[in-house]
Each structure stands twice: as structure tokens, then as C-alpha cells.
Image: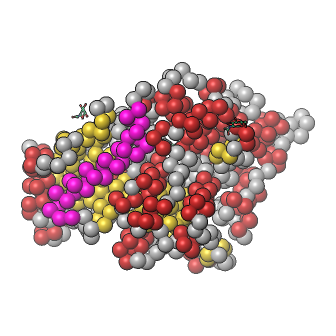
């Protein structure tokens, strides 16, 4: 019944484009797939296969309040396939494919998850399928952006660390080849945050599955990333503590940092090009005797002391480096993450198996315990020896205004790979390139030219003025893999509050964006050095 309705809706669409573009048996093959497809892998069960025409309202079957990244409708004609895949006696992963009628270049794209997820990245999948990729996603082995399902179920933690992804790749490739009756030509991965960590896990452990891997703002050094939130919570305290800053006070810290550091790059444009050159001085905000926040918008010595600690790295037992400082300029985004639930979830359900572990129990010992446990290698800190051997390309990017995951962690990982493999940048360039993106927040948003075609649904929010993804991460990766043209720059775009478009080419590390002069909103005004 549903199939017939959809067919009628799409028939109207075909007449306006090309009637021959859609192979006639594609729809039939799609709807018959659930019945006819018998994968050799017996752990796979097809739950749904349905043809969905452009414009069909989209519904998210993952009913969980934290799984909300759902596109409102299908934006190209596609075949939706949902599969239930058993990964052990006590775990399973839901794998989903969006297979476009107009499959361009026989390309396969695997998407990543977010946070402690638990949520299929339907928005990223819609982005991929719009670009003509056979696009896959999965729920990473449990439902919801929460660690509660990890409690005493190590198989689910294993799925979260890497197994759900590895399984989804093979299941997804097989279903794709079956539907199109032909082999995939090129295989890609794109993810940000936890999706970035998953991309690095693939690059470190099973790079042969992909020709190109796009890694955004990776949540690797994962246990310490979690612990760092506990550390930051301990520094800033609760609203009733003398160390605590409210949102307005953090905004004042942000403004003072911008005043101090925005001009280092030679132009006052609300973007710090090299945040590593910025050394915040919260003492600028200190109250004189008798002054208060209410009357003078100043901070106490206790508050200033706490803020200063936020811009220092987190050291563990015996002075061991654990995690990078808060990135200067990311304050307005970061304040929403300091009290994130992730750390408490991770420690309670994955590390200690003790739901009553409380924020006040956090100490450097907690960080030590998490590092020792490192469940299923979730830290994701190995080098890229296997990537190099497989001939796979890795493109990593990180927003320098990322308040959720410090971009300094991405520099640290890049340099770790360089030292560990004994390769200077000219040699890493052959398979691994890193792009810091000034003015980009956590995977999307920010005050700079932040839209780099990385799958965030920017254009959904700005349907009247969509931004091009040309020169962004996905188009550059395809050129690198398929034409051998390695990316030197990433083109970023955004709109200012007054509606003006900003465009900038972001440079590949270790070169950096450099202001040549002129209108800072034009890419001609910038170079790399
Ligand atoms: C998926 O498979 C698991 C077993 O691996 C089973 O418990 C679950 O009920 C299945 N879900 C659906 C919707 O079939
Ligand atoms: C810290 O040093 C002590 C004494 O040398 C050692 O036993 C312990 O393992 C060290 N801890 C860490 C986390 O390195
Ligand atoms: C767990 C949590 O609160 N995460 C938030 C961190 O900040 C980013 C960007 O502001 C949000 O998107 C996350 O939801």
C-alpha cells in the first residue's frame, strides 16, 4: 500500500526530469530485497526495504529522546534498507542504507555517530545520498546518546569502540552490491566527534575497508577526554561554589580573550587564526577591592584563578599529560559542555559498573582507572602505520573554536603520528593531512568560514541561500582518491549576521592561514605560510 503511494508521488517527479534516469527495476528490486536478499553472513536480518521518492516525509525508527537528528523528508529518490545485525550473543547493531536511484561513481560512504551514541546519523546519511553516494549508517550497537546500556554488558561497549562500525561496513557493502548488481568502485568514510574517533579507529585498525577517511574533531584520547570534563567540573564547581562562573561571566571571559587575541593575526574579524598563539589573561577581569560582578562586571580572585586553570593542560598522577587545555575563543560553546553528562555516564556504566559514582568522586585516580581499563581500545591513539601500508588517504579537520573537544588534541595526535612513524609532514602528506579550521565550532557553526561541506545540515536551516560544498572535505577527498589531486586547502563558507557571504581557504598544517590584507571576508585576502 505504502509502496503504491510512493510510486505515484515519484512518477510526477520523473516527468519533470529524465524518465530514463531511474532504472525501472530499481524500485522492484528495492521492495523485493527484504524477501529475496540472502546474505552469506547469517547474522544479518533485513527488517525493511522500501523505495522512498524525493519529498517523502522521513521517520526515525530509533525512538529515543536523544536521537533527534532527523531530516524532515527524503531529498532524493532512494531505496531505504534497514537491517538487524547480531554482533554477539548479547549485542546487535541496526545498520541502515540509503541507496540512491542515481548512484554516482559507484561510491560507498559510511557515516559516523556522535557522543555516546547510540543514534543513526540520518542527517549525515541524507547529505551523502544527496551527493549520489550509496550511504550507510548504524546505531553503533545501542539505542540513544547514553552509556546506560553499557552497564555489565561488555559486548555493547565493544560495539561502541569499533565492532559495530566494522560489522556495518561489511554488511553495508554487501547489501549495496546486491541491490545495484555491481561492485562498489570507491569506498569512503566521513564522521565528526565520536564519528571522528570511529574514522581514526578505522584508519588505525582496518584501513583496507576505505579508500578515503574523513576525520572531523575526533573524540580520541577518549578516556582522558571524558576525564578532562570531570577535571573541568572540579575546577569550576557547582553554581553555589565561589569558583563558578555563570553564562554571562563566561561571555565576559570570551570577550576579554577576543580583545587580547583576535588581532594577533593582523585583522579584527572575530576569528583567532592561530589559537595556539593565544595566552588568555583572565586577570584583566579582576575586581578591585569593593567592586562586584553586579555593579562592575568583574570577577573575584577565586573565579579568575579557576578560569586560569581552564587554560592549562590536565595532568594526572606523577605529572603525566592527560588532556589539552580549553581552546581560547571557544568559551561560549564550551560552557554548555563543562557539565556534560558524558563523563558521569562513561565512568558509571563503562568503567566502574557503579551507577552511584558521583561527580564529587572524581579525581586523578579516576582518570588513571579509566586509562588502565581503556575498554576495547576506545582511546584510539595508535599511529597510522596500517593506513600507510593500505594506501588509504586520511583527511582530518578540527574547528579551532571547538568548545566540546579541544582542537589542540588534534595537533597533538598529528605530531604523535609524525614521531611514532618517524615521518615529517612532507611524507605524512602522502596519506595523512590535517586542517585546523579557525572560526569553526564543534563540527558545525562558529564565527568564521565554517561550512566545509562536512555533512552538517546547514542548507536545511538556510533553504533560500544554500551554500556550496565545493572545495569542502568530501569533494576534496574524492578528488584526492579518484584523481590523485591531494588537498592543499579546504574552502569554508558562511553568512555573517548582515547576510554577507564569507569565503576562506583554510590551510593544511603545518602551514597556517595568513592575512595578506584587504577585505577579510574574501578568500583573496588570505594565503598560507
Ligand atoms: C534484533 O536482533 C536481536 C538479537 O540479536 C533481537 O533481540 C531483537 O529483537 C531484534 N530486533 C528486531 C526489531 O527484530
Ligand atoms: C607514579 O609513580 C609511582 C612511583 O614511581 C608509580 O608506582 C606509579 O605507577 C606512577 N603512576 C602513574 C600513573 O604513572
Ligand atoms: C553533552 C553535551 O552537552 N554536549 C553539547 C556540547 O556542545 C555542543 C555544541 O554546543 C552541543 O551540540 C552538545 O550537545
Taking depth in this image into account, of 503 and 243 the one nearest to the observer is 243
182 in magenta: yes
Residue 308 appears in the figure = yes
Please check the rendered image and state whether residue 139 is part of the magenta-colored stretch, yes or no: no
Front-most of residues 255 and 510: 510
Magenta stretch: helix, strand or loop mostly = helix
Asked if residue 445 is positioned above or below residue 395 in the image, the reply reads: above
Check the image and name the residue furthest to the top.
356
Residue 254: percent from left, percent from top: 69, 49
Q: Residue furthest right?
A: 289
Q: Which residues are magenta?
A: 154-183
Q: Is residue 349 above or below residue 41?
A: above
Residue drawn at (57%, 39%), measured in percent from left and top? 371
Q: Quadrant location of the N terminus?
A: top left
Residue at coordinates 46% horizontally, 66% vertically from top-left?
Answer: 388
Q: Quadrant of ligand 1?
A: top left
Counting from the top left corner in percent of width and height, residue 20 is at: 12, 70
Q: Quadrant of residue 275?
A: bottom right
Whether residue 122 is situated above or below residue 189 in the rendered picture: above
In the rendered view of the protein, which quadrant contains the C terminus?
Answer: bottom right
Question: Residue 55: x percent and y percent?
Answer: 24, 54
Colouring chosen for the image of the structure:
secondary structure
Q: Quadrant of residue 8?
A: bottom left
Against 86, residue 386 (above or below) is below
Please name the residue shown 28% across and 52% down the image.
Answer: 170
Observer-nearest residue: 439 or 275?
275
What x and y, as percent, mark residue 197? 48, 50
Q: Residue at x 84, y 43 (%)?
A: 286
The answer, for residue 452, to whether it is visible in the render is: no
Amino acid at each position: 500500500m505504502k509502496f503504491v503511494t510512493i510510486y505515484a508521488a515519484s512518477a510526477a517527479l520523473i516527468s519533470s526530469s529524465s524518465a530514463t534516469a531511474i532504472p525501472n527495476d530499481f524500485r522492484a528490486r528495492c521492495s523485493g530485497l527484504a524477501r529475496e536478499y540472502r546474505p552469506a553472513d547469517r547474522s544479518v536480518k533485513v527488517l525493511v526495504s522500501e523505495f522512498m521518492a524525493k519529498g517523502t516525509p522521513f521517520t526515525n525508527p530509533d525512538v529515543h529522546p536523544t536521537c533527534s537528528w532527523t531530516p524532515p523528508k527524503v531529498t532524493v529518490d532512494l531505496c531505504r534498507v534497514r537491517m538487524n545485525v547480531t554482533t554477539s550473543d548479547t549485542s546487535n547493531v541496526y545498520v541502515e542504507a540509503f541507496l540512491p536511484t542515481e548512484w554516482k561513481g559507484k561510491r560507498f560512504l559510511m557515516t559516523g555517530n556522535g557522543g555516546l551514541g547510540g543514534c543513526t546519523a540520518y542527517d549525515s546519511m541524507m547529505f551523502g545520498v544527496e551527493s549520489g553516494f550509496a550511504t550507510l549508517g548504524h546505531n553503533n550497537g545501542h539505542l540513544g546518546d547514553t552509556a546506560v546500556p553499557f552497564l555489565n554488558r561488555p559486548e555493547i561497549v565493544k560495539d561502541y569502540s569499533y565492532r559495530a562500525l566494522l560489522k556495518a561496513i561489511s554488511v553495508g557493502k554487501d547489501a549495496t552490491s546486491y541491490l545495484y548488481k555491481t561492485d562498489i568502485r570507491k569506498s569512503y568514510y566521513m564522521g565528526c566527534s565520536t564519528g571522528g574517533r570511529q574514522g581514526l579507529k578505522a584508519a588505525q585498525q582496518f584501513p583496507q575497508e576505505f579508500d578515503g577517511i574523513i576525520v572531523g574533531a575526533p573524540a580520541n584520547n577518549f578516556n582522558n577526554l571524558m576525564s578532562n570534563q570531570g577535571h573541568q567540573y572540579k575546577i569550576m564547581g557547582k553554581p553555589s561554589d565561589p569558583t563558578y562562573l555563570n553564562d554571562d561571566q563566561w561571555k565576559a571571559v570570551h570577550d576579554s580573550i577576543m580583545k587580547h587575541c583576535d588581532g594577533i593575526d593582523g585583522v579584527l574579524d572575530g576569528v583567532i587564526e592561530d589559537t595556539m598563539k593565544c595566552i588568555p589573561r583572565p586577570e584583566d577581569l579582576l575586581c578591585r577591592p569593593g567592586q562586584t560582578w553586579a555593579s562592575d562586571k568583574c570577577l573575584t580572585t577565586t573565579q579568575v584563578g579557576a578560569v586560569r586553570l581552564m587554560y592549562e593542560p590536565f595532568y594526572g598522577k606523577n605529572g603525566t599529560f592527560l588532556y589539552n587545555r580549553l581552546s581560547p575563543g571557544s568559551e561560549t560553546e564550551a560552557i554548555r559542555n563543562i557539565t556534560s553528562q558524558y563523563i558521569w555516564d562513561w565512568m558509571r556504566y563503562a568503567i566502574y559498573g557503579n551507577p552511584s559514582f558521583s561527580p564529587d568522586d572524581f579525581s586523578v585516580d579516576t582518570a588513571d582507572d579509566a586509562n588502565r581499563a581503556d575498554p576495547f581500545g576506545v582511546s584510539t591513539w595508535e599511529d597510522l602505520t596500517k593506513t600507510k601500508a593500505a594506501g588509504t588517504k586520511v583527511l582530518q579537520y578540527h574547528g579551532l573554536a571547538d568548545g566540546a573537544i579541544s582542537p589542540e588534541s588534534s595537533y597533538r595526535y598529528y605530531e604523535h603520528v609524525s614521531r611514532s612513524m618517524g615521518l615529517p609532514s612532507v611524507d605524512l602528506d602522502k596519506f595523512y593531512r590535517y586542517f585546523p579550521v579557525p572560526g569553526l565550532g564543534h563540527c558545525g557553526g562558529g564565527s568564521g568560514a565554517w561550512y566545509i561541506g562536512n555533512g552538517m545540515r546547514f542548507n536545511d536551516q538556510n533553504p533560500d541561500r544554500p551554500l556550496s560544498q565545493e572545495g569542502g572535505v568530501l569533494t576534496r577527498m574524492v578528488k584526492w582518491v579518484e584523481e590523485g589531486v591531494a588537498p592543499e586547502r579546504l574552502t569554508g563558507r558562511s553568512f555573517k549576521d548582515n547576510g554577507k557571504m564569507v569565503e576562506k581557504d583554510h590551510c593544511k598544517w603545518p602551514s597556517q592561514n595568513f592575512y595578506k590584507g584587504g577585505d577579510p571576508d574574501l578568500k583573496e585576502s588570505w594565503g598560507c605560510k
